[in-house]
Each structure stands twice: as structure tokens, then as C-alpha cells.
Amino acid sequence: MLQTPTEHFEAASTLAVVVSSHEPLLFLSEEQRVIAASASFCRAFEIDPATVTGKCLSEIGHGEWALPKLASLLKATASGSAQIEAYEVDLKRPNQKIRNLVVNARTLDDGATDRVRLLLAVTDVTDERAAARLKDDLIREKAILLQEVQHRVANSLQIIASVLMQSARRVLSEEARGQLRNAHNRVMSIAALQRQLSTSTGETVELRTYFTQLSQSLGASMIDDPERLSILVRADDSTVSAGVSVSLGLIVTELVINALKHAFPDQPTGKIVIDYQSSGDDWTLSVADDGVGMSAGSDAPVAGLGTGIVEALAKNLAGTIKLTEANPGTIVTISHREGAVSKSSLSRAS
């Protein structure tokens, strides 16, 4: 059938657009013969432009475009039963590296109503895929290296803790022995933090599990008789970033150590409860015991290292510290309210 002047003009315009395109394009007939190829397509895939027109897609180049799956998809696209969107193919050519391509195809109206035309667009993503693979390899290597570092840190902490405990047994001064035991307990608590964080996946930490494992580690290292003293965790389903979890874990560690040292001097049994609740950006962490309660007047101990650690960590988290009588026992609460000014008030020493 002869083309009308309008159809001829539209067909010529389509050919001109395809040929001059900066993107690799192929203009195909329903039978997948090349009507036109963009100069960028010929340059990208090292094909002589003079050899392309009139050939089947499977015949161009050295036959590397004879891809049965692609041919089937193009046939389905021509019939209107499918459309090729971001279909990935590997182009294999003699003596050259494999090219990773993303192909898109659709029918194109060139002014004629009695035939189907296909426009095939090709994007070379070889470099992007190589960069992604390199990134994945680097991530895996980093994970392996981090695991090795964590293993070495854990071993080092165990060695330090053992040296401190051996030193505590040898020294004659009761004051020095107490300081060495305090140092041992803190090293063990940091080891527990490190162990928990090393087993967490992703960038967030689930606090209930985190506090539970932390309390178990503290109990194992500091409670001689689990029937006498216990540590419980009551927390919601909150998750926090790894950085925030470290600060919260150190706060809990210091407060639990403080309670174990001061709250139960003569009691036959005792309990420490770690509680964490959150709502939006607001949260409350508390460590409560049912021990002897706060000392008063001349009996009040001087604020120690643990107090300074808790106050510094709470300030870093924009939290407010409150120390209250529980009758029996003591409750230390650190709360964060969005927009509130942080305050600290601790008196019982660590």
C-alpha cells in the first residue's frame, strides 16, 4: 500500500529522530528487521552502520544479538500482549568482555496504520554492575574484618579482666582491692556490651533482648547467689540505633553495678528491675531496686565514677535524671522528652 504524504513525512521524521539519537536505539519492523539504527548504537557496539539496515536483529554484528528470549519478548510486544521494560541481557561478543545491558522496547506509531514498528532502546550498565559488585565485595570484606576485630576485642577484654582479678587477689590494701574489682566489673560490662552488639544485625538494636542479655552477663559476673539477688527486664518492643544502644547499655550497667554494691548490704533477697518504654521520640529508662534505699545526711556516699558516667551519658542523650525513693529501695529514671532541657540529679555513688 502506498503511503500518503502525511504518512511519508511522519515515517521520515521517525527515522531522522532514531538515527540522530544520542541513545543507542534500533527501529525494527514487526519481523524484527532493522529499519534504522542510531549512530550511538553502532558506536557503542562497534557495528558498521552500512551493514545494519535491512538485517534481522539476530544477524547484526557477529550474531551476538541472536537472543531467543529477547526475540520472543519483542514478538509479544509487537502483538500487544507484552511490553519490554528494563529487561537485562548479557551481550557476549568474540574476544571481548561481556556487556551487561538493560533493554526497553515498545511499539511506535510512524504514521502507518497497516504495520507495526518497534523501538528498542539499549542502556549499557556494565560499569554500574561492576561498581555494585565491587561495593558488595567491599561490604563482605568489611564484615569479615569487623568480625575479626570484634573477636580480638573480646579476647583482649577477657585478658584485661583476668589480670585485674588476679591483681585484686594479690594486693593487701582493701581499698586497692575494691578499686581493682570495680575496674574488673566495668571491663566485664563493656565485654557484655561488645558481645551483644557484635551479634546484632543491621543498624538497629532491639532493646528488650539487648537488656536481657546484658543483665544476664552482669548477673553472671557479679551475683554469687542467684537465689538471693536477681535482675529482671521489662521493656517494650523499642529499637534504637547501635550508637544509642551503647549509651543506654552503659547507663544500665553503671546503675545495676551501683545497686548490686550498695542496695543489699544485709538483705536476704533482692531484685533489680530494668524498664524501658517509649512513645514516638520520647522514652523513659529506669533501674529500680527493692534494697535499703538512699542514704541521708552523713551516711550519704560521695558521688563516684559511675555517677559521672551516667550523668555524662544521659546528657549526651538529652535525658533528664531523677533519683527517687521506692519504699523499699531506689529508682533511678532517665527520661527524654522532645524539646525538654536535660537535667541531672544523682547522689548515690558507684
Image (tube, rainbow, N blue to C red):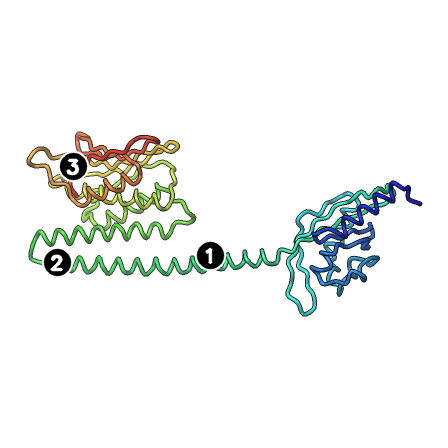
Which of the two labelled residues, at mark 3 and mark 2, occupies the earlier sequence position?
2
Looking at the image, residue 284 sits to the left or right of residue 140; the answer is left
Q: CA distance from mark 1 to mark 2?
A: 45 Å
Image position of 39 with respect to 229: above or below: below
Looking at the image, residue 174 sits to the left or right of residue 145; the answer is left
Query: Which amino acid does the dot numbered 2 rest on?
Result: Arg
CB atoms at circles 3 and 1 under 8 Å apart? no
Q: Residue furthest right?
A: 1
Q: Which mark is residue 117?
A: none
**Badge 1: residue crowd in 10 Å (few <14, some 14–19, many ≥20):** few
Q: CA distance from mark 3 to mark 1?
A: 46 Å
Which of the two labelled residues, at mark 1 and mark 2, occupies the earlier sequence position?
1
Which structural element holds mark 2? helix
Nearest to viewer (mark 3 / mark 2): 3
Q: Which mark is residue 347?
A: 3
Identify residue for label 2: 169
Q: Position of residue 32 (x, y in %)?
A: 80, 53
Which structural element holds mark 1? helix
Closer to us: 139 or 1: 1
Identify residue for label 1: 139
CB atoms at circles 1 and 2 under 8 Å apart? no
Q: Position of residue 298 (x, y in %)?
A: 6, 36
Looking at the image, residue 299 sits to the left or right of residue 53; the answer is left
Nearest to viewer (mark 1 / mark 2): 1
Q: Position of residue 313 (x, y in %)?
A: 27, 42
**Badge 2: residue crowd in 10 Å (few <14, some 14–19, many ≥20):** few
Query: Which amino acid does the dot numbered 1 rest on?
Result: Ile
